[in-house]
Image (spheres, rainbow, N blue to C red):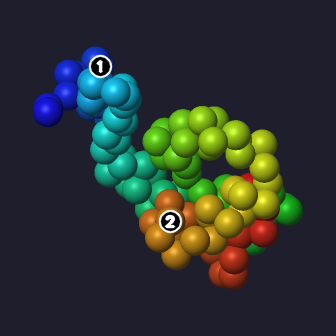
Amino acid sequence: MAGRILSQTAHKTDIWHDLGDRKVLELVENTDPVLARVKAITEAQPDRHDGMRHEAEIPAHVMRQAYIEGWVHDEERWRRWANDPANRAFRIQHHGRVKTL
């Protein structure tokens, strides 16, 4: 069964699915703007920094997942997310692994 669009912007669409015994809210996010921002930041950053640097851009659907699952304040979980090869596109490219977020 097709869902009902609750809201839609250029960057995301929220779709409500009524599956009878359960209800599901689906977030479909266009991550192209996020990836373009990652590329621009990577290209603009010098190699040197003063101990602080931008490590990653977090898409809205990942932030929503972190809140729902209760790991939004868990630094180790964010470190695992940032270093996961599947999330490489969202990391600002530096030499080495992400140590903290």
Mark 1 closeness class: few <14, some 14–19, many ≥20 residues within 10 Å: few
Quadrant where the image shows the N terminus: top left
Q: Is residue 40 visible?
A: no
Give me the residue at 27% from left, 29% from top: 19
Q: Quick one: 71 or 52, which is closer to the camera? A: 71
Q: Is residue 80 visible?
A: yes
Label 1 is placed on what type of residue? Answer: Ser
Q: Quick one: 49 or 3, which is closer to the camera? A: 3
69 displayed left or right of 50: left
Mark 2 closeness class: few <14, some 14–19, many ≥20 residues within 10 Å: few
Residue 88 location, x and y as percent? 50, 70
Name the residue at the front extreme: 21
Q: Quadrant of residue 83?
A: bottom right
Give me the residue at 78% from left, 43% from top: 73
Q: Quick one: 68 or 80, which is closer to the camera? A: 68
Q: Which mark is residue 95?
A: none
Label 2 is placed on what type of residue? Answer: Asn
Q: Is residue 53 above or below residue 19?
A: below
Q: Quick one: 19 or 84, which is closer to the camera? A: 19
Q: Earlier in the sequence, mark 1 or mark 2?
A: 1
Name the residue at the right extreme: 51
Residue 40 location, x and y as percent? 46, 57
67 displayed left or right of 48: left
Residue 13 location, x and y as percent? 29, 30
SS of the residue under disc 2:
helix
SS of the residue under disc 1:
strand
Q: Which mark is residue 7?
A: 1
Residue 75 location, x and y as percent? 79, 54
Q: Is residue 71 above or below residue 35?
A: above
| Label 2 sits on residue | 87
Name the residue at the top extreme: 6
